[in-house]
Image: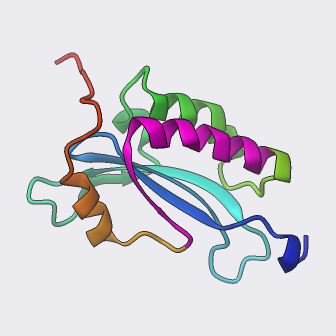
Amino acid sequence: MNKKNELPTVHFCFQLSKSIVFEVSYYRCGNNKNKYFTTSAALFNRPKTDWNQCGQAQKSLLPPFTKAMNFFNKWDKLHLEDLSKTKYSEMIQDIAILKDKYNFIESDTNIIFNDIKTLSKLTPKRFIKTIA
């Protein structure tokens, strides 16, 4: 696909709680020829100066039976894959569900730590109920 017809780069970061975020991206890393799809999850440390856990931690950080986990379960099979126009459109539709459920940041460039930290300080749209 030439640059003119190339699918847009997107980066989303969703606040799942005051300490957990979920990221979804479709972008070109470095000098790679193609863009690729990826998700990740992160847990802040207590003073929010760094991550306590991050990266491919979705299975341990995303609460079960949530919109974020449903998204991850559906799309994980395409992790690090280039998306077709059809799959890209479907992903954007599924992201709309996440945007309705969670506070988020959207960008066409990488989202920086301080912006994610600011996002994490918002009151979550809906509190996540967990069993202790």
Decide if residue 110 is on the left or right side of residue 47. right
Q: Within the image, what quadrant is residue 27 found in?
A: bottom right
The residue furthest right is 1
Q: Which residues are magenta?
A: 87-108
Of 14 and 31, which appears nearest the observer? 14
Position of the C terminus, as image quadrant, is top left
Residue 84 location (% of width, % of height): 84, 52
Of 100 and 79, which appears nearest the observer? 100
Seen in the picture, residue 46 relative to 96 is either above or below; the reply is below
The residue furthest front is 100
Residue placed at 77% from the left, 64% from the top?
7
The residue furthest bottom is 31
Total residue callouts: 0
The residue furthest top is 131
Residue 55 location (% of width, % of height): 43, 54
Residue 111 location (% of width, % of height): 42, 69
Q: Within the image, what quadrant is residue 37 found in?
A: bottom right
Residue placed at 62% from the left, 38% from the top?
94
Residue 109 is covered by the magenta coloring: no
Residue placed at 65% from the left, 49% from the top?
79
Q: Within the image, what quadrant is residue 2 found in?
A: bottom right
Of 32 and 126, which appears nearest the observer? 126
